[in-house]
Image: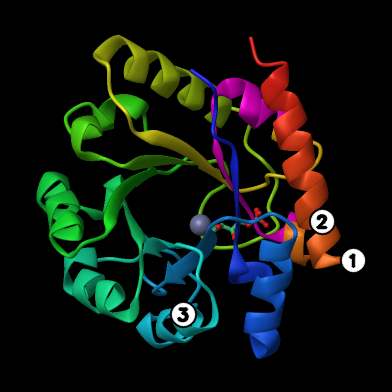
Amino acid sequence: MAMRIELAPSILSADFARLAADAQAAIEGGGTLLHVDVMDGHFVPNITIGPPVVACLRRATKVPLDCHLMIENPDQYIPAFAEAGADWISVHQEACIHLDRTLHLISAHGCKPGVVINPATPVHTLDHVLDIAHHVLVMSVNPGLGGQKFICGSLEKMKALVRIRESRGLAFRIEVDGGVALDTVADVVHAGAELLVAGNAVFGNGNIRENASKLLQAARSAALTRA
Ligand code: DX5
Ligand code: ZN
């Protein structure tokens, strides 16, 4: 099956005082989703943004907003994110006691449900929800901060997800988040990731539009050489 590679610039590394302009530059460079990192200071040590910022982004851009909830009690906040204009909402397996219910709750609010696993969480913990997930996000850093080093063990998990998807005839998409940059992008694409989140590599230094465009180009070249 041909891979549909998409770049999801993570606004975590954008300049929040010029958020709309930075996001627009990343989209002009080829970003087709905006990845929005929501952190609560409990599930992860950092605190970032909430529904009001999602609502502003919704007015500023047309691309789907991919909201990655790194929060405890996500059920409590899913309605507010949906109302603010989130298109995709992903929750951490580690944060959800009733994961099946939470994914159904996301769908019931009209959003695409995604499930996320931390670097220490095995793929098999998702066996019973893969049929209701629109996307599976494999963390390739420990969540909480941008600009961290890529954890190579995540590649095996992406490969395992490709095998499981094939053997069970499922359709979830595979997303990777953390340390995706020019030096790691070929590996993640070869491992089967098709939704590529990138924060620091897009917004960190230099020209945002060019950074996004070079990264996407590298990903598409890698897809052509995927076994
Ligand atoms: C990390 C966030 C990521 C982060 C990735 O907790 O979930 O989305 O922005 O940043 P980079 O691409 O800089 O590793
Ligand atoms: Zn993220």
Q: Vertical placement of 73 versus 99: above or below?
A: below
Q: Vertical placement of 130 versus 75: above or below?
A: above
Q: Residue at label 1? A: 206
In magenta, the rendered stretch is 186-201
Residue 80 in percent (x, y) is at 25, 79
Element under disc 1 = loop
Query: Dot 1: few (<14), some (14–19), or many (≥20) neighbours within 10 Å?
Result: few
Residue 226 in percent (x, y) is at 66, 16
Element under disc 3 = loop
Does label 2 or label 3 sit earlier along the sequence?
3
Residue 161 or residue 119, whichever sits in front: 161
Q: CA distance from mark 2 to mark 1?
A: 7 Å
Residue 3's image quarter? top right
Q: Which residue is pictured at 42% across the width and 74% down the height?
A: 41
Q: Residue at label 2? A: 211
Q: Residue at label 3? A: 49
Residue 118 in percent (x, y) is at 43, 43
Q: Is residue 54 left or right of residue 200?
A: left
Q: Amino acid at mark 2?
A: Asn
